[in-house]
């Protein structure tokens, strides 16, 4: 009996020791996966390629360090990493070396307009030139057709801080068509980041307490909307985000 108890004790000790070794190994594997997934994400490989961003994960707590060349890239990086499986928290220590733009300054509005047009698949092929003066946005360049030109103005007019839009886009049948690709494979974390930032930038949806979840391109929105019209508008905006396959709008109307 004593020998049996001793053997059981030894086995239990061995199991505890093995579990202690396996746990750090599992955490290390998860952290490696988070860091690798961030670097390979659509956002990092498309929009953040020129930035010096270092990603370090420890037990799911991610720290971002380094520098970015545009203010909005700090938020892009953080939102993308936050949406990766296994991420528990994100400590964003990224630094922007330029002068910080005041809220709704012309420089900040220009950034929001630029990303709004890029994130929406119906407007991202526009060969655009954006200028902002006292909240008045001027769009120049070439659109593929009149519908795309008009839609660009609609999207830009709804960007928070924009007072009016001067649409000087010309229509060209060859505009950007030669640069179109097959349907892009965009990871869920990158889709979630685009959706969250787009909802924040648009004045019609910026005040919503919206939670975004993406599963294989299918986006679910939850939280609160001010009214039914804004709830519907959120669906229309999200449906046009690059990589989104479908939208389930579970926003409740206050």
Image (cartoon, grey):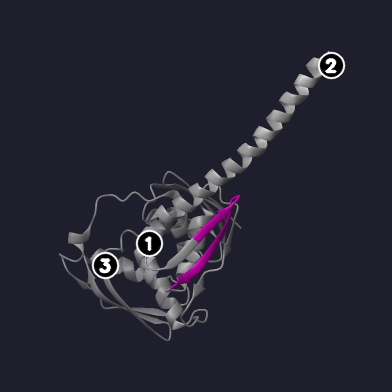
Could you give the CA–CA distance between mark 3 and mark 2, rounded to whole angstroms? 81 Å
Q: Position of residue 251 (x, y in %)?
A: 55, 52
State the residue at coordinates (58%, 45%): 27
Q: Residue at x 81, y 19 (%)?
A: 5
Q: Is residue 6 above or below residue 110?
A: above
Query: Which disc, if any, is residue 2?
Result: 2
Residue at the extreme top = 1
Residue shown at the point (69%, 29%) measured from the top left: 14
Q: Is residue 204 part of the magenta span, yes or no?
A: no
Please state if 142 lies on the left or on the right of 85 as rendered.
Answer: left
* Mark identifier at residue 126: 3
Labels 2 and 1: the sequence-earlier one: 2
Mark 2–mark 1 Cα distance, whole angstroms, equals: 70 Å
Highlighted magenta segment, given as a residue range: 55-68
Lower sequence index among marks 3 and 1 = 1
Residue 245, image x and y in percent? Answer: 38, 47
Instruction: Give residue 113's quadrant in the image.
Output: bottom left
Q: Is residue 117 left or right of residue 206?
A: left
Which residue is the site of mark 1?
A: 119
Answer whether labels 3 and 2 touch (C-beta < 8 Å).
Answer: no
- Residue 204 appears anywhere in the view: no
Identity of the residue furthest to the bottom in this view = 134
Q: Residue furthest front?
A: 3
């Amino acid at each position: 009996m004593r020998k049996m108890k001793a053997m059981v004790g030894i086995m239990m000790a061995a199991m505890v020791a093995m579990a202690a070794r396996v746990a750090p190994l599992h955490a290390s594997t998860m952290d490696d996966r988070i860091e690798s997934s961030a670097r390979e994400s659509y956002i990092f490989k498309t929009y953040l390629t020129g930035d010096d961003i270092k990603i370090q994960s420890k037990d799911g707590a991610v720290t971002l360090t380094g520098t970015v060349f545009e203010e909005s890239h700090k938020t892009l990086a953080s939102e993308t990493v936050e949406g990766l499986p296994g991420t528990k928290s994100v400590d964003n220590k990224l630094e922007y070396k330029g002068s910080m733009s005041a809220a709704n300054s012309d420089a900040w509005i220009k950034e929001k307009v630029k990303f709004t047009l890029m994130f929406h698949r119906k407007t991202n092929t526009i060969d655009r030139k954006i200028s902002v003066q006292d909240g008045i946005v001027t769009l120049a360049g070439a659109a593929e057709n009149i519908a795309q030109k008009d839609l660009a103005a609609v999207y830009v007019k709804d960007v928070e801080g924009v007072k009016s839009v001067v649409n000087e886009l010309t229509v060209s049948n060859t505009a950007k068509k030669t640069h179109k690709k097959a349907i892009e494979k965009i990871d869920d974390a990158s889709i979630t980041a685009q959706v969250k930032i787009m909802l924040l930038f648009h004045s019609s949806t910026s005040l919503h307490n919206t939670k975004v979840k993406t599963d294989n391109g299918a986006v679910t929105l939850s939280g609160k909307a001010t009214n039914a019209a804004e709830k519907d508008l959120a669906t229309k905006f999200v449906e046009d985000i690059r990589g989104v396959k479908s939208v389930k709008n579970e926003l409740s109307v206050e």
